[in-house]
């Protein structure tokens, strides 16, 4: 008889439920992956390349001030996401269905993104810009909690790494196509659409593009991917039971020590990776003098290598394990990131950034796979809420980068902080067991 994992509001969870067979067909899985395709338009156009650069250069007044404000705002937003994610996850564990929550929070992100059109190139719009980005980020991250939690039910353990990696690869490909469309709008916006370059309308129009892209390409997931059945619980009871479940899980955290260690490691290396995303375009513009158009081209080619890496490493995840995949990717990020911070050569910067992109996707995809493989089924949304917490309490590194950038008056000094977070995450992850070894947790005489 299978051992049971304790520590839930159910009496037991069969160990075998951690690796249940997938329940979705390939059309359902590809539709699920298309949400990555659609939502990545927000990450690439708003957070990383277009709006981030536009804000620092044309709204905030100068790159250093813009970088500091950008980092501080996203750091504070990360705190809000981190606090609410586990609680919302625990509540949804009680209600069952995930797609209504994904739809609601996605809509929040889409509306906030479209509203960025209102941000004109003037310091008068700084507060509006940061407020809308904060709202969009909260919506995107909360939608991601429940989207990620769908994976273990849709794909079995033996193929979960592949689907997680392919989903991330779809995201990068979708981001690439969105950036190509944005580059077209910026380049030909005045000629083709009558947009006024004096008020940055070609750039601002790309925020409408990002919102529409997200809305359109997320539809297949809502239409064709099966959702988990609802439990029939009333909202009030689900809230009470969710709060009680979260409190019980916190009290019994020692029974999930392997998850706690993994989340601490992820907090550190995703903090560093989030910094690379947030400041990638800003760093390229400020340190190497790239224009918004050049930053877009830079984003496109980096997305190509990132998508390639996510797709190829998907098999490595299934064959050799999520932990080894993450460690290998972190090593690549540390080496290439060091070159990027130190070099003054534009050519070497480009080459190193393209190689760095190969390791970006696998870190994220393999992390999602690891959590999907080890999270107890009855606590899955809550665990992915904690997973989001470990990614969006990713505010330490951006805050440090903002402070170091301001104090040293150097973007190079600020970006170097991310390397220390990669190294710290690597060190903690060494003490985390492989997902395949977690079955030993409840066996007498064995430990992880």
Image (cartoon, grey):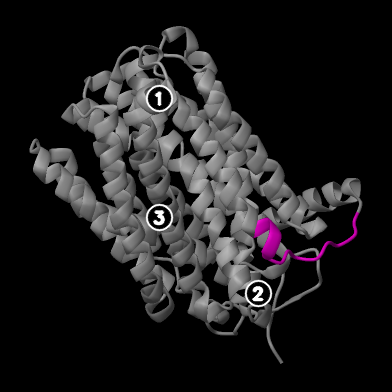
Tell me the mark number nearer the camera, choosing from 1 and 2.
1
Residue drawn at 39 percent across, 36 percent down: 182
Distance of label 1 from label 3 (alpha carbons): 23 Å
Q: Nearer the viewer, residue 150 or 396?
A: 150
Residue annotated with mark 3 = 173
Query: Does residue 440 sit above or below 213 in this rendering?
Result: below
Give percent across and percent down for residue 214: 56, 44
Residue drawn at 69 percent across, 69 percent down: 377
Question: For mark 2, does the 10 Å Cα neighbourhood hold few (<14), some (14 to 19), or many (20 or more) residues?
Answer: some
Give percent across and percent down for residue 27: 60, 71
- Can residue 76 be seen from the camera position used here? yes
Label disc, if present, on residue 24 of the rendered structure = 2
Q: Disc 2 or 3, which lies upstream in sequence? A: 2
Q: Disc 1 or 3, which lies upstream in sequence? A: 3
Tell me the mark number nearer the camera, choosing from 2 and 3.
3
Question: For mark 3, does the 10 Å Cα neighbourhood hold few (<14), some (14 to 19), or many (20 or more) residues?
Answer: many
Residue annotated with mark 1 = 202
Residue drawn at 77 percent across, 55 percent down: 245
* Callout 3: SS: helix
Q: Is residue 272 magenta?
A: no
Q: Is residue 229 magenta?
A: yes
Give percent across and percent down for residue 224: 68, 64
* Callout 2: SS: loop
Per the picture, the main secondary structure of the magenta-coloured stretch is: loop
- Can residue 447 be seen from the camera position used here? no
Horizontally, residue 189 falls left or right of residue 95, namely: left
Horizontally, residue 93 falls left or right of residue 407, namely: right
Q: Which residues are magenta?
A: 221-233
Question: For mark 1, does the 10 Å Cα neighbourhood hold few (<14), some (14 to 19), or many (20 or more) residues?
Answer: many
């Amino acid at each position: 008889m299978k051992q049971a994992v304790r520590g839930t509001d159910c009496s037991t969870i069969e160990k075998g439920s951690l690796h249940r067979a997938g329940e979705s067909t390939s059309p359902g899985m590809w539709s699920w992956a298309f949400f990555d395709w659609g939502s990545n338009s927000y990450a690439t156009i708003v957070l990383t390349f277009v709006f981030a650069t536009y804000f620092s250069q044309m709204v905030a007044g100068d790159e250093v001030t813009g970088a500091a404000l950008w980092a501080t705002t996203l750091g504070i937003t990360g705190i809000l996401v981190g606090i609410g994610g586990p609680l919302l996850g625990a509540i949804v564990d009680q209600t069952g269905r995930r797609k209504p929550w994904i739809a609601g929070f996605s809509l929040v992100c889409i509306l906030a993104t479209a509203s960025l059109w209102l941000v004109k190139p003037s310091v008068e719009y700084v507060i509006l810009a940061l407020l809308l980005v904060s709202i969009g980020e909260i919506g995107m991250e909360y939608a991601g909690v429940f989207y990620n939690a769908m994976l273990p039910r849709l794909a079995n353990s033996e193929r979960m790494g592949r689907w997680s990696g392919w989903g991330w690869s779809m995201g990068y490909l979708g981001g690439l196509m969105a950036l190509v469309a944005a580059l077209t709008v910026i380049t030909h916006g005045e000629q083709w659409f009558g947009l006024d370059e004096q008020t940055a309308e070609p750039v601002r129009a790309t925020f409408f593009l990002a919102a529409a892209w997200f809305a359109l390409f997320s539809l297949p997931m809502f239409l064709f991917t099966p959702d988990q059945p609802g439990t029939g619980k009333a909202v009030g009871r689900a809230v009470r039971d969710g709060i009680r479940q979260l409190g019980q899980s916190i009290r019994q955290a020692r029974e999930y020590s392997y998850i706690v260690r993994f989340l601490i490691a992820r907090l550190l290396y995703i903090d560093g990776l989030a910094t690379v995303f947030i400041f990638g375009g800003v760093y390229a513009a400020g340190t190497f003098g790239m224009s918004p158009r050049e930053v877009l081209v830079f984003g496109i080619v980096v997305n190509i290598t990132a998508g390639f890496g996510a797709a190829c490493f998907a098999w490595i995840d299934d064959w050799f394990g999520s932990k080894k995949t993450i460690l290998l990717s972190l090593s690549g990020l540390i080496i290439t990131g060091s070159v990027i911070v130190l070099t003054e050569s534009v050519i070497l910067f480009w080459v190193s950034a393209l190689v760095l992109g190969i390791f970006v996707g696998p870190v994220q995809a393999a992390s999602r796979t690891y959590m999907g493989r080890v999270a107890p089924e009855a606590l899955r949304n809550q665990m992915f809420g904690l997973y989001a917490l470990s990614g969006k309490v990713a505010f330490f590194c951006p805050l440090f980068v903002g402070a170091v950038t301001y104090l040293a008056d150097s973007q190079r000094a600020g970006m170097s902080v991310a390397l220390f977070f990669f190294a710290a995450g690597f060190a903690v992850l060494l003490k985390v067991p492989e997902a395949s070894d977690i079955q030993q947790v409840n066996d007498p005489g064995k430990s992880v």
